[in-house]
Amino acid sequence: MQQTDPKKLSNRYCPEGMSVEAWQIALRKQFAEQNDFTVTHLDKNRIWGDYMVQSGSNHYRVAFRGVRSDRNYCACLDFRTSGLGTCKHIEAVANYLSEVVPGYPWGTTPFQPDRTSIFISYKGGRTIECSIGKGKEELYADWQARYFEGTLLPPKHYHLIDQITREAKELSSTFQCYDDVYEMIRGYLRLSNWRELVTKKLPTGELSQPYVQAESSLEMRQTLYQLLWQSYGIIPAPHSETIIEPMIAMMRFVSVHEPGRMLIIVHDEEEQSLWHEILEMRGVTEGVSVALASEVTRQNASISGAYSFVYVACGEKLSKWTDPVSIAIKRLVISHLYISVPHLSLFTPLQFSSVTQHIDPYLLGPTYLFIEDAKQFFPMTDLPERLPQRLEGLITFLPDDPTIRTYEPQQPTTPSEEPVYDDEALPHQLLQALRDAIADPKRRIRLLETLDAILQEEQE
């Protein structure tokens, strides 16, 4: 098989005249050609079949159904989230077969299994599909017509999956529904049922008493409702203290309607003490752990398993997949995850995508596409009206509500009649003043309006 010239491809820049998808597929193909993989055939099929692919200490199971087939599957995360329908492990299988089976890409050898199955197609996104076994078209015709739209299982029928699979098994004992189908449906139904519950329990569209303090503003109560309904969120909070009372209000609601362990991960001991103090004051302590980021390690067995509610105050740590906090969060089973970050401007598109994938690796779509599309609006600002529409619901800004603040915003000082300037300190002072203006929502808007006016005057 013709080898890819490594000089033609960069993993940072898409070549001119090539689509982003074609570039990404070619990169995986190139990687498979230039690196060592051990491929083991797991069945007796000549081409289409199941394989185990080893690279270093990692092993991944691959179902190979054809070159660029939407029926291919690999257990690696890249395959499941890229939407490309391939990965370096599938390309390694294709390379292996091209050397031992003549006729690549074997277009005259169609794949049609003997058994009927329900599977996920990961090409272009995730869809649940059915494949009718060879010679079983008539047997499964009524079953397919009742539940599927062509070969697609629509979301409105997800809740019937047990009934669907039971009827299919009654028709043929060889029928198979793959495990990732159940996993996808469980996630979809959990979120759907939760949002239905929030809508039913809070019909006014706000998180009211007894969950929030009586003096909380209407805007704050409505914002907390949206956060609860969403079940997750990234929250820019330059002052971590502003978020404690809102989080406690949501924790109260979750503890009543979906009880379980809760985990708060904070920066330092001072923040930990503040959380303990306010949790004690509000009577929210049972099943709640407040851990330092430095304590969240793989060796800490107390932070493991399932949690109904997790809040990460140090969300910037999740931008690095090698950070112990990131590794720990990915190992947990979390029903509701909320992440606070100091400022959105801290992140590159790749770093922001890394943060988001702790909530759901499918939330932003393929990382390479998000990075390509995000170039126009990064670095992001902490202004809701300037965020791209695709991030609505993912990023939530809390309103400035004095009733939930445990800090006092810095007030501008009155200059003396004869100010004394320190040339070395001046850049720091300017940056500090700019930071304070950005941290205050009202001052931030005024600053932006002033800058826009100045720029407009210069253009005129």
Image: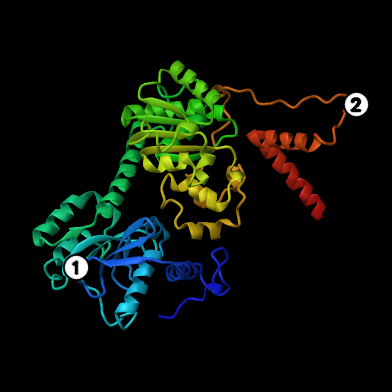
Q: Quadrant of residue 117?
A: bottom left
Q: Are marks 2 and 1 in contact (CB under 8 Å)?
A: no
Between residue 309 and residue 303, name the one nearer to us: 303
Between residue 284 and residue 96, name the one nearer to us: 96
The three-letter amino acid code for the residue at tag 1 is Ile
* Residue at the (10%, 62%) spot, across then down: 172
Q: Is residue 169 visible?
A: yes
Q: Residue furthest right?
A: 418
Question: Regarding mark 2 in the picture, which secondary structure is present there?
Answer: loop
Question: Regarding mark 1 in the picture, which secondary structure is present there?
Answer: loop
Give the tally of numbered discs. 2
> With 243 as the anchor, is 146 left or right in this view?
left
Q: Position of residue 145 (x, y in %)?
A: 19, 63
> With 118 as the anchor, is 332 left or right in this view?
right
> Which of disc 1 and disc 2 is earlier in sequence?
1
Q: Circle 1: is it few (<14), some (14-19), or many (20+) Cα within 10 Å?
A: many
Residue 320 position (above or below residue 314): below
Q: Is residue 396 visible?
A: no
State how far apart marks 2 and 1 are (Cα).
85 Å
Q: Which residue is mark 1?
A: 132
Between residue 284 and residue 351, name the one nearer to us: 351
Q: Position of residue 343 (x, y in %)?
A: 60, 40
Image quadrant where one finds the N terminus: bottom left
* Residue at the (45%, 78%) spot, across then down: 3
Mark drawn on residue 418? 2
The three-letter amino acid code for the residue at tag 2 is Glu
Q: Residue furthest top?
A: 281
Residue 451 position (above or below residue 51): above
Image quadrant where one finds the C terminus: bottom right
Residue 413 position (above or below residue 69): above
Q: Position of residue 99 (x, y in %)?
A: 34, 78
Q: Position of residue 128 (x, y in %)?
A: 29, 59
